Amino acid sequence: MPRSVKVHPDRKQEILSAIQRNGFLTQGYLAASLGVSRSTVSNFVNSKPVSISKFEEICETLGLDKRQITQPIDREYNPVSEKSSLRVNFSASQVCELLLRLAELHLELNNPTLALDYCNKALAIATELDIPLAAKCQALQEKLLSELE
């Protein structure tokens, strides 16, 4: 049975983010908080073996899954990496619906000026592309304009 374990090298950025997210300015602060040497934390971050007990303690403190952190990142299901960016494609109709919903939310939040801005953007898209939401956008726009007068 192994006495030590190490994180997968793919997980370094995830670990560094967890250190910051948990309020540790440096690896040294994390080490001091745990009562371990800075080299133990450095070994953990840099995918070098650390004792199982220290590994589990660091994972628990940082809120990391101790099983998952030893596995490579599944590139198929995690398209975001250092060399790529996350891209999401929306149809014009979906964008129009989102803008209209944002307008309705800001109206509910008693922010009619911002609501009108979102509504105008939705209306411009709906009118230009002949999206059926144009009538709903126009009705909301009229309501917002009357509230702003």
Image: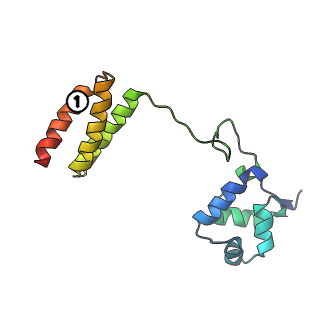
| Quadrant for the N terminus in the image | bottom right
In the displayed structure, 90 sits above or below 39; it is above
| Residue at the spot 20% in from the left edge and 36% down from the top edge | 140
> Which image quarter: residue 14?
bottom right
Q: Nearer the viewer, residue 64 or 119?
A: 119
Residue 79, percent from left and from top: 64, 39
Quick check: can you spot residue 57?
Answer: yes
Residue at far right of view = 1
Q: Nearer the viewer, residue 1 or 147?
A: 147
Q: Residues within 10 Å of mark 1 (few under 14, many from 20)?
A: some
User: Which residue carries the number 1 mark?
Assistant: 136
Residue 6, percent from left and from top: 81, 57
Q: How is the image coloured?
A: rainbow
| Residue at the spot 31% in from the left edge and 25% down from the top edge | 128
> Which image quarter: residue 86?
top right
Quick check: can you spot residue 63?
Answer: no
In the displayed structure, 26 sits above or below 9; it is below
| Residue at the spot 70% in from the left edge and 70% down from the top edge | 27
Q: Amino acid at mark 1?
A: Lys
Residue 53, percent from left and from top: 78, 66
